[in-house]
Image (cartoon, coloured by chain):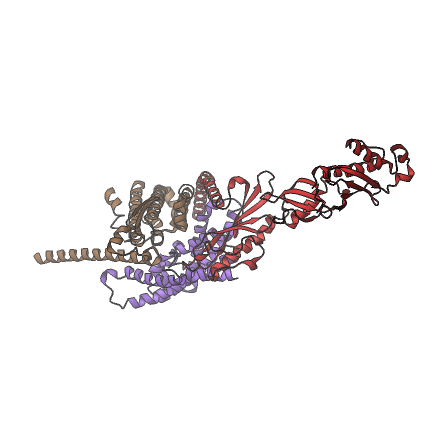
Chain colours: A brown, B purple, C red
């Protein structure tokens, strides 16, 4: 496939969170604020792109590939863990508030199925450039998914949208216009599950409708023959 | 002593690993369709988390800290967990092949279960001493087993309910989890 | 076999490379992280005290108490206060507290820094008055917590942990008793000088309280000059008694021993060589009590019989009368005649008399 499809598939067709349902743990935990979702997205981007690149490079030479193949899972894990630790250390030093907000979920990027999954499914058998593009698409698709969930949770739960640090948009006046207050429940675990479930349901409904339409058009084509 | 009871109670229910801390969601959604596999997975997770917490904490305090290599903890921990899960796999294959087959792909996926690595790291971050770590690492996966078992009951019943097409499968499971989370949240006095 | 070996080597090589990468990144970031944490801790400390007033030493510990700030006096480097960052698990979260202890093991300040307890029930511990301020840290009976049992017990556990640790940090640090004697003089008020011979002006305590006290002949505290002044604590009074004995402005070997306002008669006792039998000067004053009419010495000094001081210096007792005569003639008291100790005793007595005439009521 060409690079454009390679890149875009991570956003809709094979979205890691909404379609493959991978990496769900951080998606429920860090989406209380848009800022945290952006931070997590950037961390996953860094790790996924670099791990795809390194693993693809390692497996590109046939000689190396034969050596690594029997122990490839531990090798992949070590590479990913190293990258995650680097991200963790840099965040701890220079982005301390984000580090505290994301907490234990930064080292847990290691066990984020997306990264190991892409390494196993794509990077080890594709060229480095393709792997990098795939990684970028997947990571950005994941970040978009996180942003969608966190936007809903933060907006309905607190009435604000925190983009980064002090850059906070206060939209609570919209609530006052209707006459209600922001629903605090959405910032709690309950809201996380609810938001995620409803978004998946909406996506499933639209996918079903598309299949219905395709079936209809196939039937009409058959009838027309 | 009361501190340990509070810690156990917190790890089991109040700060429940799935419904409050959001660790272990993937197997929670994936394995909970049948009661037997949920129970088997839960027990395997209890074993893995308890043993891995002991091993990783000992490694951290007796090897990494004296050599000032705390930054190696993520790599060391995940390799220890991977090795441990491999051993559990071999053990189950010999002892209970039916359970091994029932768990299928999800058994090696315990390696990537956020709860296992998460517990190991939380033990370090919270500076627990040995006894506190034992209590925490035992009651936390017990909470996991408890919730996943209850959830499997619910999901079996949902199979017979007239769920709208769009909600079938994962979405309705998540909505059910939301209601469970609401119930468990009351233990903390918050909503 | 060979494949296994190769795989093992691959993993080992990879592990080493990754270790090197991490070590180098760690070398860059670790100092930055340490700096940030130290600054954050100093910021919390700044809520209690002004960090510029002390020399601060930070002990990093592992366990429930993760850091200890030792606040030492800027000039003497003596440990004055210790601030502890301590954590304990409450109902559903770690409660982190900052507790400050004085050198005398009493609680100075405390604050709940972070907690995640139940809203409205457990989180009342933030800002709650646990009645521990000013109490000795070991006196946990004084602790009074809210009805949220788990949360309150966790706070109590924090105090308990700090008490155990504070005993170690303050072991060997004796509290400094800060007391200065600004002046120590004879009490010249005839109404009171018989029972309260000395007046000391002192500055004491951390807040430099200045006050005047009456002292007895053994320099023990008798009472406050101004009854409205607060009495200093016993530790200060003990220190005062010790210090006063080294002051040379007064001598408790010379003092007023009797006074009769009607006959204007004043007795001054002074101890010389034979301190068991002191010299007593009976002084008769004029009506205004600012001039001497007569001084009559009574002395049992041992030399009277063994030396011929009477022959050299006049009527017996020779030294005493000689000095009295010189005093009455010219008020000069700078001659020592013969027996030194006796002379000194006489001179002190006459100096005291002179002070009375000049300043007394």
Q: In front here: C132 or C168? A: C132
Using the image, determine if residue A224 lies above or below residue C284. Answer: below
Point out residue A105 in the picture as x, y percentages from the top left corner: 39, 50
**x 77%, y 38%: residue:** C292
Is residue B122 in view? yes
Q: In front here: C101 or A189? A: C101
Quadrant (top left/top right/bottom left/bottom right) for the C terminus of chain B: bottom left
The answer to which image quadrant residue C122 occupies is bottom left
Horizontal side of residue A85 vs C282, given as left or right: left
Q: In front here: A208 or B174? A: B174
Point out residue B55 in the picture as x, y percentages from the top left corner: 49, 54
The answer to which image quadrant residue C28 occupies is top left
**x 31%, y 67%: residue:** B156
Point out residue C91 in the picture as x, y percentages from the top left corner: 45, 60
Horizontal side of residue B142 vs A6, given as left or right: right
The answer to which image quadrant residue A60 occupies is top left
Using the image, determine if residue C107 lies above or below residue C309. Answer: below
Q: Identify the residue at the far front of this view.
A: C287
Is residue B97 in view? no
Point out residue C61 in the picture as x, y percentages from the top left corner: 54, 48
Marks counted in the figure total 0
């Amino acid at each position: 496939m060409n690079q454009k499809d390679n890149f875009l598939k991570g956003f809709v067709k094979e979205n890691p969170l909404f379609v493959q349902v991978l990496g769900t743990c951080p998606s429920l935990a860090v989406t209380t604020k848009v800022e945290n979702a952006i931070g997590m997205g950037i961390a996953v981007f860094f790790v996924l792109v670099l791990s795809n690149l390194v693993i693809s490079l390692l497996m590109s030479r046939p000689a190396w590939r034969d050596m690594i193949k029997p122990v490839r899972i531990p090798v992949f894990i070590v590479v990913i863990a190293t990258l995650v630790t680097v991200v963790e250390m840099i965040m701890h030093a220079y982005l301390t508030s984000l580090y505290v907000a994301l907490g234990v979920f930064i080292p847990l990027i290691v066990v984020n199925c997306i990264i190991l999954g892409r390494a196993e499914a794509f990077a080890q058998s594709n060229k480095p450039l393709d792997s990098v593009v795939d990684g970028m698409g997947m990571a950005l698709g994941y970040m978009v998914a996180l942003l969608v969930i966190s936007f809903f949770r933060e907006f309905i739960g607190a009435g604000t949208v925190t983009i980064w640090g002090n850059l906070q948009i206060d939209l609570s006046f919209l609530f006052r216009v209707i006459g209600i207050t922001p629903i605090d429940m959405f910032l709690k675990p309950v809201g996380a599950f609810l938001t995620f479930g409803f978004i998946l349901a909406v996506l499933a409904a639209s996918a079903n409708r598309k299949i219905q339409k395709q079936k209809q058009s196939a039937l009409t084509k058959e009838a027309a023959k | 002593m009361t501190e340990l009871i509070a810690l156990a109670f917190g790890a089991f229910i109040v700060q429940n690993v799935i419904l409050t801390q959001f660790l272990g969601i993937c197997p929670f959604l994936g394995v909970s369709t049948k009661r037997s596999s949920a129970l088997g997975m839960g027990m395997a997770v209890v074993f893995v988390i308890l043993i891995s917490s002991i091993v990783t904490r000992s490694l951290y305090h007796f090897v990494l800290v004296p050599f000032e290599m705390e930054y190696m903890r993520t790599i060391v921990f995940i390799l220890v967990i991977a090795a441990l899960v491999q051993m559990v796999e071999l053990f189950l294959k010999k002892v209970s092949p039916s359970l091994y087959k029932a768990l299928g792909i999800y058994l090696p996926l315990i390696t990537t279960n956020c709860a296992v690595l998460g517990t190991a790291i939380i033990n370090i971050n919270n500076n627990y001493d040995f006894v506190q770590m034992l209590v925490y690492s035992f009651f936390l996966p017990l909470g996991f087993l408890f919730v996943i078992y209850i959830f499997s009951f619910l999901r079996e019943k949902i199979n017979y309910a007239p769920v709208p097409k769009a909600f079938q499968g994962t979405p309705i499971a998540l909505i059910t989890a939301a209601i469970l989370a609401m119930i468990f949240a009351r233990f903390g006095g918050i909503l | 076999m060979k494949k296994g070996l190769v795989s093992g080597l691959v993993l080992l090589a990879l592990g080493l490379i990754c270790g090197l990468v991490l070590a180098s990144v760690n070398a860059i970031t670790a100092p930055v992280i340490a700096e940030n944490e130290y600054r954050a801790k100093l910021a919390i400390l700044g809520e209690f005290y002004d960090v510029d007033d002390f020399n601060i030493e930070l002990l990093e510990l592992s366990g429930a108490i993760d850091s200890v700030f030792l606040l030492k006096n800027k000039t003497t480097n003596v440990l004055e206060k210790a601030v502890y960052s301590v954590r304990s698990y409450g109902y559903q979260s770690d409660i982190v507290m900052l507790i400050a202890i004085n050198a005398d093991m009493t609680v100075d300040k405390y604050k709940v820094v972070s907690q995640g307890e139940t809203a409205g029930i457990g989180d009342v511990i933030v800002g709650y008055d646990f009645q521990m301020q000013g109490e000795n840290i070991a006196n946990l009976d004084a602790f009074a917590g809210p009805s949220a049992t788990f949360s309150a017990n966790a706070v109590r556990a924090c105090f308990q942990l700090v008490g155990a640790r504070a005993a170690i940090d303050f072991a060997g640090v004796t509290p400094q008793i800060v007391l200065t004697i600004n002046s120590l003089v004879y009490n010249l008020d005839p109404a009171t000088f018989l029972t309260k011979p000395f007046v000391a002006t002192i500055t004491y305590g951390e807040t430099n309280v200045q006050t005047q006290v009456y002292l007895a002949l053994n320099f023990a505290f008798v009472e406050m000059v101004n009854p409205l002044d607060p009495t200093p604590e016993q530790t200060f009074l003990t220190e005062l008694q010790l210090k006063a004995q080294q002051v040379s402005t007064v001598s408790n070997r010379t003092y007023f021993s009797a006074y009769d306002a009607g006959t204007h008669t004043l007795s001054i006792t002074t101890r010389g060589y034979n301190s068991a039998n002191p010299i007593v000067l009976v002084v008769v004053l004029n009506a205004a009590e600012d001039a001497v009419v007569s001084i009559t010495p009574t002395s049992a000094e041992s030399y009277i019989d063994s030396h011929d001081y009477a022959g050299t210096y006049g009527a017996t007792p020779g030294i005493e009368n000689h000095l009295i005569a010189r005093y009455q003639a010219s008020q000069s008291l700078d001659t020592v005649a013969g027996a030194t100790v006796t002379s000194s005793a006489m001179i002190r007595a006459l100096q005291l008399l002179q002070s009375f005439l000049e300043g007394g009521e």
